[in-house]
Amino acid sequence: MANRTKWTAKKEGQFLEQLAATGNVTRACRASDVSRTSAYDRRDELPAFAAAWDDAVLQYAERLEDEADRRAVEGTVKTIYYQGLPVGEETQYSDTLLMFRLKALKPDAYRERVQQQVVGDPNAPVQVQITRTVVREGGTE
């Protein structure tokens, strides 16, 4: 095995390429034959490498966003089977991914709205009471 602590321009390029492709530091280290420790040490010591690392992670995140958008808007085609044989296709969309993207892109319109108000002395201890109501079959408590 080659020296896993010696960085070269080639190893750095391989590391950053794999990090952009996978978003996974361990895989990027394996692909470029460097240790995780040396990768993080290099990140701490070289601001230019840290910036390139951040850019690679951002590239991967943008790929994931593109895929989430595709699944939410264009959907994925699933084969429909009947008695073990394919009989058709159906496009399935991800409402969950769509909502996550809307919340990210337009947080003012799609964020969760929770309003809390604390009244009284701000230095006093706060008492919280949690009540659970069990509704029995037939609609009675």
Image: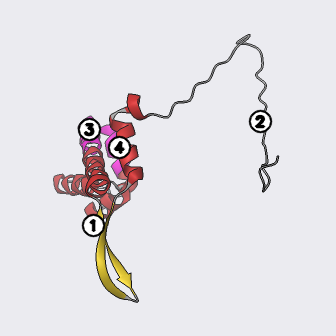
Residue behind mark 3: 51
Q: Which residue is mark 2?
A: 130
The residue that disc 4 covers is 101
Say which label, 4 or 2, has the lower sequence index: 4
Residue displayed at 32% across by 38% down = 45
Label 2 secondary element: loop
- Contact, mark 2 vs mark 1 (Cβ under 8 Å): no
- Residue at x-position 78% and y-position 56%: 137
Q: Is residue 114 above or below residue 40?
A: above
Query: Helix, strand or loop at disc 3?
Result: helix
Regarding mark 1 in the picture, which secondary structure is present there?
Answer: loop
Nearer to the camera, 28 or 9: 28
The mark closer to the camera, 3 or 1, is 3
Q: Badge 1: few (under 14), some or many (20 or more) residues near its Cα, within 10 Å?
A: few
Residue type at mark 4: give it. Arg
Identified by mark 1, the residue type is Ala
Q: Main secondary structure of the magenta part?
A: helix
Read off the residue under disc 1.
Answer: 2
